[in-house]
């Protein structure tokens, strides 16, 4: 017996002379003497016989001895990313050699040539095992839809993320092979696995950390914050979810221990990257509540029927955290976005002081967004179908409106090159960090996530301690008009009072300058800090609107009832014409800067009101508020 075992060992060494390790005492050693296999023979001592024989009546390459599977109804891997790619109907013969055991349809010991018999038969396995049990680690079954594709051609012309390789691959020091071993061959089981060598478990041709990158290249992957974690931290080659993820959709990001609530990672800036908790807040993107409608790499619009907000809509995990020269957070690097092909040129309404919004007519897809709003507009614009009650943000952020928050850069209106100079009141006296730089050197544009993110846990946006981004917020605003439905994912509340003003506004604009302390500089010198009457807000006994008393509250006619009330924070296409209401004061004067709300008898030239005593009681009319209608 010892001599027989020695001969077996020598034959295996010769057969695998290029391998660093033989199959002895691995899970592929099914002999009775194997010390590692969970499945092994009752009495058969030979090691190679389960797959190979020197003589066989069946003409199969590799001196094959294992009875081959006759399955013709394998379910092949499919993906939306492979649309238009040649899809094989079944695995190729080389992969079927492996499937003879791993699909669980043929007895593991079934061979063409039983040792010493010259005829076919079945080598009896211990514990009553016949076919591979479903519970076994190596069981794959006939459903290959959740396994790395096999039978597909290695086509770099179709897939730009495949690395161009020249034949033969072995000459390049690579053990990853195609079938046949040529640059245009097909991907098979042996592309990744070497059944005779378990040095890189489980029988991998290369270490798991580098196996994927032999074939696949992802833009800026090596600069990504996820690079050191490796592909296997998110993906698995067998029994994976869509895109071969370890877990379904967002759960994959949580369960990896990076963005979940159990063991959240700490970012490079010291922020706790617990996104799972944020997405469970009362105001949040529906990432945790919608599943099964997202696929990796989608490029079309998000239709109303399958509307979703998955992690991959805003983040590219292969580029996240890499260096970016665009005006966008590094966590958003590489994400697709959309932008209006042409921002319509508006004409400010000088007749009835109503906003006249213009909807962009067409959009272009941007492979890698350079502005945060381009990512948001994929859902929050007429690029896609809008659900009832949701604003089309694109019609409010036109950079050429008279009043905007600068989400979109604009060129100067006189047609010369360059972008328009920054508002001079956006400076260190009037603004909070990080918006307090000198206007002449300021490079940071306003981002959607400056207002739409979880509540600020630091003193300002720069020092927040959680994951910044439009995930979710626990800030809730009541339903008192016109503030209803305005509370979506806010860093601060818009519920206002005479003591707090409007907290959301003071995330960027200096509260001490505009509300509490001495006014340093402003286009209007009667802000609440210099005129206590202007903190009363309601101007007639109604509810207080804080900053909205004069700014951004619009879409109604003074002196009438039944008109809608809405807050337009993103932008307004209007110029306020005081002459419409009172020709005796400020006749024909125009003003921009989100001026509306409780504006009454303003002299825009002198930047004063007709009378401040008694909160404009001496004025010929007074605007309506929540509970009253003027004059």
Image (tube, grey):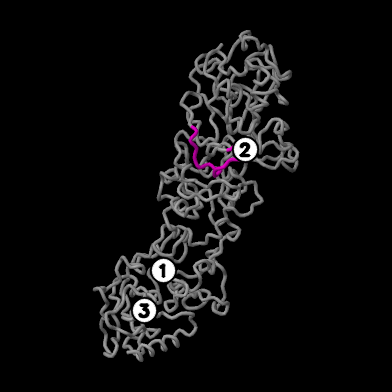
- Give the Cα separation between the discs numbered 1 and 2: 48 Å
**On-image quarter of the N terminus:** bottom left
Mark 3 or mark 2, which is nearer the start of the sequence?
3
Q: Position of residue 618 (x, y in %)?
A: 63, 8
Determine which residue is flagged by label 2: 344
Tag shown at residue 88: 1
Determine which residue is flagged by label 3: 29
Q: Residue at position x 65%, y 15% from top?
A: 601
Kindly report which numbered mark, 2 or 3, lies closer to the viewer in this rendering: 3
Circle 3: is it few (<14), some (14-19), or many (20+) Cα within 10 Å?
many
Q: Position of residue 51 (x, y in %)?
A: 35, 81
- Give the Cα separation between the discs numbered 2 and 3: 71 Å
State the extent of the magenta-drawn residues as a range.
458-475
- Label 2 sits on a secondary structure element that is loop
Mark 1 or mark 3, which is nearer the start of the sequence?
3
- Asked if residue 464 is among those painted magenta in the image, a careful observer would answer yes
Q: Quadrant of residue 165?
A: bottom right
Question: Toward the viewer: 615 or 29?
Answer: 29
Tag shown at residue 537: none
Q: Position of residue 598 (x, y in %)?
A: 59, 19
Question: What number of labels is visible?
Answer: 3
Question: Toward the viewer: 363 or 254?
Answer: 254
Mark 2 or mark 1, which is nearer the start of the sequence?
1
Q: Residue at position x 62%, y 22% from top?
A: 351
* Above or below, comparing residue 362 to residue 566 in the picture: below
- Give the Cα separation between the discs numbered 3 and 1: 32 Å
Q: Position of residue 609 (x, y in %)?
A: 68, 15
- Label 1 sits on a secondary structure element that is loop
């Amino acid at each position: 017996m010892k001599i027989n075992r020695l001969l077996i060992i020598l034959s295996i060494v010769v057969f695998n002379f290029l391998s660093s390790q033989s199959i002895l005492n691995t899970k592929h050693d099914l002999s009775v003497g194997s010390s590692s296999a969970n499945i092994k023979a009752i009495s058969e001592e030979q090691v190679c016989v389960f797959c190979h024989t020197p003589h066989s009546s069946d003409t199969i390459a590799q001196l094959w001895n294992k009875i081959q599977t006759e399955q013709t109804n394998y379910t092949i891997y499919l993906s939306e990313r492979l649309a238009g790619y040649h899809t094989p109907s079944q695995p190729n013969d080389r992969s079927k050699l492996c499937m003879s055991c791993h699909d669980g349809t043929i007895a593991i010991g079934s061979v063409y040539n039983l040792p010493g018999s010259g005829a076919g038969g079945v080598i009896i396995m211990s514990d009553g095992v016949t076919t591979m049990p479903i519970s076994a680690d190596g069981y794959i079954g006939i459903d290959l839809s959740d396994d790395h594709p096999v039978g597909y051609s290695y086509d770099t012309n179709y897939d730009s993320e495949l690395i161009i390789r020249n034949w033969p691959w072995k000459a390049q020091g690579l053990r990853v092979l195609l079938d046949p071993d040529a640059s245009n061959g097909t991907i098979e089981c042996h592309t990744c696995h070497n059944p005779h060598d378990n040095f890189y478990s489980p029988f991998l041709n290369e270490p798991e950390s580098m196996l994927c990158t032999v074939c696949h290249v992802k833009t800026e992957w090596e600069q990504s914050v996820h690079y050191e974690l490796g592909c296997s931290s998110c993906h698995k080659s067998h029994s994976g979810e869509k895109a071969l993820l370890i877990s379904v959709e967002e759960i994959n990001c949580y369960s990896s221990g990076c963005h979940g609530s159990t063991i959240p990672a700490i970012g490079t800036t010291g922020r706790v990257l617990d996104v799972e908790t944020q997405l469970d807040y009362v105001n949040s993107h529906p990432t945790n509540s919608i599943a099964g409608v997202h696929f990796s790499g989608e490029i079309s619009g998000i239709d109303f029927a399958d509307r979703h907000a998955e992690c991959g809509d805003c983040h590219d995990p292969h580029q996240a955290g890499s260096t970016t020269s665009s005006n966008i957070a590094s966590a958003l690097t590489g994400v697709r976005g959309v932008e209006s092909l042409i921002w319509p040129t508006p004409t400010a309404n000088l007749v009835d002081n109503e906003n006249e919004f213009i909807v962009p007519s067409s959009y272009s897809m941007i492979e890698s967004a350079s502005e945060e709003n381009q990512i948001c507009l994929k859902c929050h614009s007429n690029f896609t179908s809008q659900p009832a009650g949701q604003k089309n943000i694109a019609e409010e952020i036109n950079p050429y409106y008279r009043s905007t928050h600068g989400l979109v850069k604009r060129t100067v209106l006189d047609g010369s090159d360059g972008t328009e100079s920054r508002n001079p009141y956006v400076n260190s006296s009037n603004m909070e960090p990080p918006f307090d730089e000198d206007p002449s050197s300021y490079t940071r544009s306003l981002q959607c996530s400056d207002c739409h993110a979880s509540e600020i846990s630091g003193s300002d946006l720069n020092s927040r301690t959680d994951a910044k981004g439009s995930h979710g917020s626990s800030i809730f605003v009541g339903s008192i008009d016109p503030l209803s439905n305005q509370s979506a994912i806010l860093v601060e509340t818009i519920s206002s009072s005479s003591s707090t003003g409007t907290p959301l506004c003071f995330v960027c604009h200096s509260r001490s300058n505009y509300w509490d302390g001495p006014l340093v500089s402003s286009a209007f010198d009667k802000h609440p800090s210099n005129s206590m009457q202007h903190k009363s807000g309601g101007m007639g006994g109604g509810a207080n609107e804080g900053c909205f008393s004069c700014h951004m509250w619009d879409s109604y006619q003074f002196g009438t009832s039944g008109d809608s009330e809405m807050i337009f924070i993103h932008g307004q296409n209007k110029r306020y014409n005081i002459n419409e209401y009172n020709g005796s004061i400020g006749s024909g004067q125009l003003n921009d800067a989100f001026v509306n709300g409780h504006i009454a008898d303003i002299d825009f030239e002198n930047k004063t009101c007709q009378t401040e005593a008694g909160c404009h009681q001496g004025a010929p009319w007074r605007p309506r508020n929540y509970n009253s209608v003027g004059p």
